[in-house]
Amino acid sequence: MIDGVFWTALALVFEPQTLMVGLAAAMFGLFVGAVPGLSATMAVALLIPVTFFMPPVPALVAVVMTTAMAIFAGDIPSVLLRIPGTPASAAYTDDAFAMTKRGQGELAMGICLVTSAIGGLFGAVVLVLLAPILADFAIRFSSFEYFWLVLLGLTCAVFVCHGNMIKGTVSLLLGLFIATIGLDPLAGFPRFTFEVRDLYSGLPFIATMVGMFAVSEILRTVTALGQPLEVVKHQFGNVFAGVWRVLRRYHWNMWRGNAIGTAIGILPGAGADIAAWISYSVGKRFSRTPETFGKGSEEGLVDAGAANNAAVAGAWVPALVFGIPGDSVTAIVIGMLFLKGLQPGPMIFDNSPVETTALFIAFFVANLALLPIGWLAIKASGYTLSIPRAYLMPIILLFCMVGSFAVNNDPFAILVMLVMGVVAFLMMENDIPIAPAILGMVLGDQLEKTFLTSLMKVDGEVSRLIERPIAAWLAAITVIIWAMMLWSAWRQWRAAKTRA
Amino acid sequence: MRFNNAVLGGLLLAGAIAIVVTASGFPNVPGQQFGPRHFPYLIAAGFGVCGALLVAQGLATRRATGEAWVRLGDWMTSPRHLLNVGVVLGAMLVYWWAAPVLGFIPTAFILLALMMRWLGAGWLGAVCVAAATTAMIHISFYSWLRVSLPLGLMRDVLYP
């Protein structure tokens, strides 16, 4: 039976049409990732309207290809421009650029490429092994466990935010509020719709995502236009020369980076960027030469490079098993899974075995294909980075408008995209993180439904929400994380007061 | 444009009140303890707490450093960059209004060419890239993906 499913999925992934879609998505991901300011999340947000018209397997392959390629391609401008192409490359940009300056551009690029591919494969193995086990466990969950799990996921999204915890919480609450717009999940009463019929089914998800991730970036770019990028002219030779020597020397760093990346990816709300930062910090902490970090350290590059692509697959674990996104990419993907009739949750492996197996295969194919396709992207990097923003931004904006419109053929989506783009832009200007808001939007409905259903089951006695053992454990972890955040905020406040 | 935290907190408190007032009009569900208003109440409570904390934080910062209530970003003091933002937002509004009337092809072409030119591209490059992009998007979305992009004035030209 399993063999049959596997071969069917394999055949679907290797259909010529699916391979063509995958190749096109890979090119798209490489391009978006390599252009500074355009992120992997934005690539996926722009891709989703197109996948709307595809069968499930090519759509999944397209998303996996785009993400894996975009996260790697973010390293290219790090090496050549000292500007990370995506936030996931920011942790080691100084090291990559310092290596280029001292004539080791090929080696820096090779380390990034190979560690990305290995990290991605490691994450894929964990996804394949862990997700079905977790699903077997999660099948016993009732609304109580789901409520605490969703709350824990949302808590983690605030916990991993850089900067002001209050602003992280505000972002989360904003997302939860946006999720309440439309018919309420229990009684079907229209809330905050102000008699606008288009709002009865809530804000259009894809237009909201495109607005928050793509339009906000366009606005950010056009407010900084005129600051020319200085590309280091570098003709790449053999990028693989010397890589194996470095990986042999730092093999422990690589496996540790893979493990950290995958674990951080599984944590709801934390994606490849945070994985890379944490792995880089851990690498520096345990290094014999921490003083070289930030100045062209091969070790730092291995540590962080191994983590970011591993996080991509890790983020799919909670998304598939619990319907709780591991990062902002999977937050968008969950919307796509529903559109494709694939209901995320513990039953997904039973209800859609071919599609989930195809997804696993796609991760292996994408990360193996990363080596040759990534190598070509490195060779073509000079051309990619020289495309003027004056051409690029209007084209992306048109894609945003057409993509948002395309899902339901509804011009209202363009207005939603505009408003949400401005909201996200103002949030970024005021250091309010966007990721918690996205998680709030995706999980708000589920949080409300599980919370109120559980309360009804226990006649409104809040204390009985923890009477089941797993629910109690999840509640305890959630409370501990909130206590840690409050403790940390209090210490920061005390330190600031002492300084003043 | 950066607001002092006290201003952000004030906006959140106002938002919290607005949510409570609006949600108080939501009906009870007969026979149920909880209804459509309870979750928004919790969100409003969260906004209220965060708003109060931000107000306290913002006032403390203002006392210590003299931070302005609103600080304009560099782009807001540059007419060129301010207009860039206006052009992007205006383009979306124009597309929303004009595409159903004029059709996707003329609207997209004109908007692309004008935006590219405004952002610094040469006329010839802007017109050529705008034409090629419009054609590519029309073919891929309208012909391949079967998205009913508005034809508008082009209906008679494309399908006489």
Image (cartoon, helix red, strand yellow):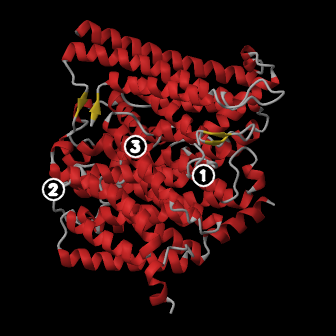
Q: Nearer the viewer, mark 3 or mark 2?
A: 3
Looking at the picture, which amino acid does disc 1 mark? Gly
Q: Pinpoint the chain carrying mark 1.
A: A
Q: Earlier in the sequence, mark 1 or mark 3?
A: 1
- Pointers 1 and 3 in contact (CB under 8 A)? no
Q: Pinpoint the chain carrying mark 3.
A: A
Looking at the picture, which amino acid does disc 3 mark? Ala
Q: Residue at x 40, y 65 (%)?
A: B95
Q: Position of residue B104 (x, y in %)?
A: 43, 74
Q: Earlier in the sequence, mark 1 or mark 2?
A: 2
Q: CA distance from mark 3 to mark 2?
A: 25 Å
Q: Pinpoint the chain carrying mark 2.
A: A
Q: Residue at x 33, y 58 (%)?
A: B90
Give the residue pinned by disc 1.
Answer: A335
The secondary structure type at the circle numbered 1 is helix
Looking at the picture, which amino acid does disc 2 mark? Pro
Same chain for mark 1 and mark 3? The answer is yes
Give the crowd class for mark 1: few <14, some 14-19, many >=20 residues within 10 Å.
Answer: some
The secondary structure type at the circle numbered 3 is helix
Tag of residue A424? 3
The secondary structure type at the circle numbered 2 is loop
Q: CA distance from mark 1 to mark 2?
A: 37 Å
Q: Is residue A54 left or right of residue B75?
A: right
Q: Residue at x 56, y 41 (%)?
A: A441
Give the residue pinned by disc 2.
Answer: A228
- Which residue, as the protein is rendered here, is positioned at the far bottom? B160
Q: Is residue A330 above or below residue A143?
A: below
